[in-house]
Amino acid sequence: MLLKHLPIFPIIIPLIAAGLMLLRQDKYRRYKIALSVISFTLQLLVAVLLLNMADGTIETSWPEGVGVYLLGDWPAPFGIVVVVDRLSALMLLLTAVLGATTWIYATARWDRSGVHFHPLFQLLLMGLNGAFLTGDLFNLFVFFEVLLAASYGLMLHGSGRARVNAGLHYIAVNLIASFLLLIALALIYGVTGTLNMADLAVKAGHLSGPDRLLFESAAAVLGIAFLIKAAAWPLNYWLIDGYANSSPPVAGMFSIMTKVGIYALLRIGTLLEPTGAPAAFGGAWMFPAGIATLIFGAVGTLAAHNTQRMAGYCVILSSGTLLAALGMPGVILTGPALYYMISSVLGLGAFFMLLEMVNRAQSFGSDFLAASAEAFALTDDEDDENTSDVVGRAIPAALVFLLCAQGDPHFS
């Protein structure tokens, strides 16, 4: 009986956790940390179970490893539908692992830099999980807004003029993307009378004449909205400052957010095109857009003088790699692209946090030496040794995670 309701758990677990956290003030930090530990443990467990159920390791009644959960038992396409397959279950597990690791890093000190960090983090997870599970476009829009609203708060978490300016830029661009997405959904619903993805895949094939033209125009607007969220060039100038000025654990968690746009392109493309190739949905532009994004990310990475900005360009580079791979004709590169996405998301998430460790150690060591030289003409060998230990551990690890983002065969 419990397994029947399991597909909805990744959405309601972080939602309940966030609600319980908001009942207490931020001074009850241990209470919120305990709730977060319970939430992450349950999310990891549920994600593993769903992946095994979709893969057939656990025997279920799901046809071809696809589970459909109808909220309130309302039949599709009228009710809210949650769909679990191997791809969505994999994304749930990836989100849970990345979320748990970045949250653990944040509890060292970053969660104290502002209010409501822990409930915002849980709401971000709820939005991500919902976007990966939803079976209709309107609820995809709803979950996009949930995760974006939470990300606005997390990006502005802390203080500083640069962070506020970058956050406002990030908010403005994503509001435009949400507006375009809503316009596209209204046009699609006006033509087809449905926003359920499976029902839409059936009805879209029977459109002709003006209705077909209007549907393709709506799909183009929908694609632009998803490309903004996927940080495709030239729609990605909002990302660098936003990620560079966010706290390291938040920026690490944000490394998966651009992949939500790519996931949406992949999911809708495979449904709307009989060939199952995501490139068919994007037409001839997805591969060139991916190459342009890849080049922009590579040049930006080489030109960046700030390590946080360099990591932000690496996120763009990984998005370009995925768009270029998915833009190739056929489906031969879809599987390798998904494997690359796993390693790049985890690698970039860890890279943001490791860079903060290196910068913190170098900054502390240089400040201490400057003060000592000026005041006493002394240095602290023990401090030098501790700083070297931190840098010595962090830099090799950062190189490993960069190889993951690069797509090195040994790490991808």
Image (cartoon, helix red, strand yellow):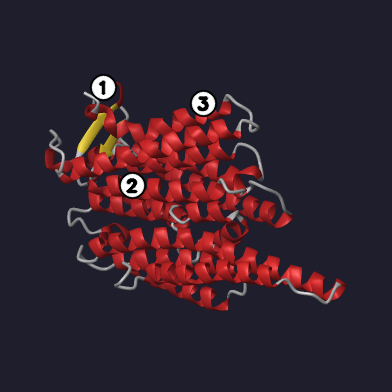
**Secondary structure under badge 2?**
helix
Quadrant location of the C terminus in the rendered image: bottom left
Q: Amino acid at mark 1?
A: Asp
Cα distance, mark 2 to mark 1?
Answer: 26 Å
Q: Is residue 58 visible to us here?
A: yes
Viewed as shown, does residue 161 lie left or right of 409?
A: right
**Image coords of residue 92 (percent x, y):** 34, 45
Q: From this viewpoint, which residue is outermost toward the front?
A: 382
**Image coords of residue 351 (percent x, y):** 49, 63
**Secondary structure under badge 1?**
helix
Earlier along the polypeptide chain: callout 3 or callout 1?
A: 3
Eyeballing the image, is 6 above or below 214?
Answer: above
Q: Amino acid at mark 2?
A: Leu
Viewed as shown, does residue 170 lie left or right of 340?
A: right
Query: In terms of depth relative to the viewer, which is nearer, 140 or 126?
Result: 126
Query: In terms of depth relative to the viewer, which is nearer, 143 or 6?
Result: 6
Q: Residue at x 65, y 32 (%)?
A: 27
Cα distance, mark 3 to mark 1?
Answer: 27 Å
Quadrant location of the N terminus in the rendered image: top left
Give the labeled residue for mark 2. 93
Give the labeled residue for mark 1. 73
**Image coords of residue 44 (percent x, y):** 35, 42
Earlier along the polypeptide chain: callout 2 or callout 1?
A: 1
Eyeballing the image, is 200 above or below 170?
Answer: above
Query: In terms of depth relative to the viewer, which is nearer, 338 or 263?
Result: 338
Cα distance, mark 3 to mark 2?
Answer: 23 Å
**Secondary structure under badge 3?**
helix
